[in-house]
Structures are given as structure tokens and as C-alpha cells.
Image (tube, rainbow, N blue to C red):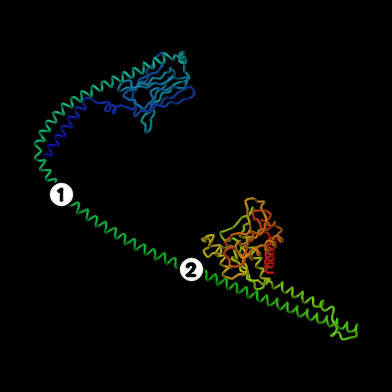
Amino acid sequence: MIRNILLSLLVLCAVTSAASAAEPTFSDRKANLAEFHAIRIGYGAGTVRIVIDLTRQVEFKESYAENPSRMIVDLQDTWLNPTVKREIELTSTVGKRIRIAQFNPTTVRVVIESMSATKLFYLPGGNSGQRLIIDLGNTNFKADPNFNKPDVDAQRERDLETQREIEREAQRERELEAQRERELESQRDRELQAQQERERQLQREQDERERELERRERELEKREQAQLELERRKKVQQEQERLERERLERERELEKREKELEKREQEQREKELKAQRDKEIREQREREKEIMEREKREKKERERLEKEQREREKKERKERERLEKERGKRDGKDTVAQPKPDESKVDEPTDELDRDLNTLTALKGRKIVIDPGHGGNDAGAIGPTGVMEKNVTLKVATELKRLLEAEGAQVILTRYDDSTVSPKGAAASDIEELGARCDVANRNNADIFISIHADAFTRPEARGTTGYYYSKGSGRGQQLADAIRRNLVEQLGTPSRGTQPCNFYVVKNTDMPATLIELGFISNKEEEQLLDSDEGVKRAAQGILDGIEDYFG
């Protein structure tokens, strides 16, 4: 039965194909024609080039007509794409306009209003097929006397006539096409009726066998559905097992990575703790070494002062004995029992020595933390000639440390070289770095904390020295800032910008009186030069030392 159905369908297709082949449609004819799908105009010196894009090379006929002068080119076996512009005005003396139309079902006519010399030839068009080239104008060009004389009405009439001719031809083509379609449709209807009768007969013969086939097909479909359901369940189970294996594998991998990460973090913490302990041990050893050296210097100083004291006392005794002998000779009496009007003058060297000793030992035993601002990857402000704030503050802090230790003070710097203070180094945040500097002072129970900086501003004329203190502190920080600022201005000769309250982290989070000192403006060329010089560094350090001495009285 299936074979009979297939034979019937083949017969129907053959009849339909024969009917269709009896009268080809425009679409069928178009398949055998070249397509006129574009036209382009190019202008030269006294010439015009017309480029017609065709899907393939076709034969053409060239003719001429008068009133107005025009050249006619008929392209054989060609159809005109509706998107092509039908009329083109030329902006050249060698031609006036171009008109294009489907002259008949297989011919495209191109009318060029020009009597200039012409040259027609083909060029390969690449992906577009072929290009027909029409060159207008040469040295033998002869102008048409009437070419440039405008005759608007006549031209308009000619254009309308041409357009009407094109429209009539198109209308005839449409009517012919419609008639052919009607005839073809009538023939198809007759053939279709006969075919339908044959199909009804075949259908009656095949109904019974089809029902049997459908029954078998339903049974087969049920078996196939059952088989597909079984396979689907099996695939679902396999997919679930695969996903479960992957999940377990991911969990094992994640657990492994977590253990490795925890191990690395533990190793990193141990490494950081070890580095911190090593650093603290080194700092402790350095402090112990400094203390021992300072004690040796103090011992030598005490021995020197005691020796000077003994020599002065010896001189004083000799002086008193000499004075007593002179009085005894002058008065002839026992000088021991008489008052000694000049005795106070004799004692003056001793009082003066006591004052010298007090001055020399005013800073003795004081624990002072000096914080050279910035450092490491933080250069701080940079002056006009490239001087960096971190280098200036370290130089001044180092010189100040030397001067303070010579006075008997115990000095600790937050940094001794171009580095950061936080153990995290360059990875530390600003708060972590500043907190590490405060920790140095708090951990060592310092008496005072001094943070040294250099100011900067966008205006280069800004200059001067400033002292800062925590506005909510005990008041001792303000006294320290004011004393250092006064003496710095005196030593450096910079303008005073006063002692000002602030909320800076390092003066806010230290447990002792603290100040942040801006030596001067590194953005000012003169003050940059001063702070970068050896003399400027010494004067800045001396000014801070004088301020510390004033603060401790």
C-alpha cells in the first residue's frame, strides 16, 4: 500500500512539473537572464565614465537618435533590478542625463543624452560579475548646437512619452503574464481533479491496509516508548551518579585546598611572628648596646666632672687659705673667728658648677621616640628639584638622635633606614603603618613622641614651620609642640605658622605627650634647598633639641 501511495505522489509531481514547464513564469525567465543591478558615474577632465554592474557579460546593440541627441544601448538577455535608479542627471558638458528601463522582457535599454565620442568595453567585476564601461568625451568631441539650449516643455514631453512607453510595455507584460497564469491554473485544476479521483480510488483500496499498518505502528511505538523510557531512566541514573562523583571529588579537592591554605597561612603567621621576634630581639640588643655605650659615656663624663670638681675644690681651698693668711697679716688676729665678707664670692664657682651639672643632666635617662615621617614605598612630598620628604626626615632624625644621646637621653627611632615600619611592608595599609609607629612609642613607654615631617602645598610660595598637637590631649602635647616650634623657627629662620590642634593618627594614638612637626615647605624651592643641605639638617636637629630641653625645664 505504501508503494502505491508513493507512485501516486510521483505521478502528481510529474503532471504538475509538466504543466509548469508549459509556460515559464518571469521568475523562471529571470534565472536565464543577466541582472543589471547597479550603475555608477565617474567624472574626468572633459570625460564621463559610466560603469554598469552585470552578473555576467551580455551582448549589446548601440544606436543613435536626434532631437535631442542621444545614444541608445540595448543590453540583450538582461533584466533590470527594481532598486536601480531610472534617471540620472550628469554634471558635465559631454552628457546631460541617463535614462534606464526594461525595454522588453529580455532587454534593458540605456539612453544617454550625448553626442560625444563613446567607447564601450567590458571589465571583470570581481564578486559582482562583469562591468560594462561606457566612456564619453575625447579630443574629437563636437558639441551639439542644441545641447545646452534649454527646452523644458519639449524635454518634459519627451520624458513623459518615454515613461508612458515604459509603463505600457510593463502593463502588456503584466497582462500577458496574468493570462498565462490563468491558463496554467485552469490546466492545473483539470489535472488536479483527475488526480484527486485516482487518489480517492487508491485511498479506498488502501484504507484497510493502512489501518492494519497503524495498529502495528502503535504497538511498535509503544515498545519503542518503553525502550526509550528505560534508556532515559538509565541515563538519568548514570548522570546522577556522575554528578555525585563530581561533587565528592570537588568536596575532596576543596578540603585539600582549604588544608593547604590553612597550612600556608599558619606558616606565614609563624614566619611573620618569627620575623617580628627577630626584629624585636635585634632592637633589644641594639638598645642594650646603646644603653651600655651611653652608660660608659656617662661614667666617663661623671669621672671627668668629679675630677674637675675635686680640682675646683682644691683651688678653692688654696684660695681661702691664701685669703685667710692675707687677712691675718693685715689684722694681726685669728682669721678663723672673724666674719669673711668675701666668702660668698669664693662659693660662686661651686654654684655655677652645680648649674652646669644640672644643664648637662637635664635629659639624662629620658626615653624619647623620634618618628622620621614616611619611608619605603612612601616617598612623602617631593620638592621642585626632586628632594623627597622621607630622606629629609630620616637625616634630621638621625642627627637629632646623635645630639640627644650626647645629652644622656635614650633615643629610639621608628625606622633607621629607608623602609616601612609595619611588618607587612609595602602591603600594609596607611592605618597599619601609622599604628606600627605608635606601637614603637607605646611599647617602649617613651616619655615623649616626636614625628618629623616636611610640609607641601600646590602654591610654591607657601612656607614656614608648624607644630601640631592632639586637640583632646592632656595639654602637655601642646607645650611640647610649642617649645619645639619656637626653637625651630629661631634656628632655621623660617616663618612661624603657629602651634595648631590636629587629629593626626600618630599624636592621637600615643600614650605620652606627642607632637607632629612640619619643618618647612619642601614644595618651596628655598626651604627645599635649606632642608636638603647638611647645615639645614644640623640646624633643624638643634632646634628640636633646644625645644625638648625647654619642655623638660
Instruction: Name the mark nearer the viewer: 1 or 2.
Output: 1
Q: Is residue 409 left or right of residue 378?
A: right
* Residue type for callout 1: Lys
Residue located at (13% from left, 43% from top): 214
* Res. 242 image quadrant: bottom left
> Crowding near pointer 1: few (<14 within 10 Å), some, many (20+)?
few
Residue located at (19% from left, 54% from top): 230
User: Which percent across, then down, holds residue 104?
Assistant: 31, 20
Labels 1 & 2 near each other (Cβ < 8 A): no
Q: Is residue 404 left or right of residue 423?
A: right
Reading the image, the residue beneath label 2 is: 271
Count of numbered badges drawn on the protein: 2
Picture layout, residue 278 above or below residue 125: below
* Res. 347 image quadrant: bottom right
Reading the image, the residue beneath label 1 is: 222
User: Which percent across, then down, holds residue 245?
Assistant: 29, 60
* Res. 195 image quadrant: top left
Q: Nearer the viewer, residue 334 or 132?
A: 334
Residue located at (34% from left, 63% from top): 252
Locate the C terminus by quadrant.
bottom right
Dot placed on the residue nearer the N-terminal end, 1 or 2:
1
User: Which percent across, then down, holds residue 379?
Assistant: 59, 58
Locate the N terminus by quadrant.
top left
Q: Nearer the viewer, residue 533 or 352?
A: 352
* Helix, strand or loop for disc 2: helix
* Helix, strand or loop for disc 1: helix
* Residue type for callout 2: Lys
Picture layout, residue 6 above or below residue 492: above
Picture layout, residue 20 above or below residue 303: above
User: Which percent across, then down, holds residue 13?
Assistant: 18, 32
Q: Nearer the viewer, residue 474 or 244?
A: 474
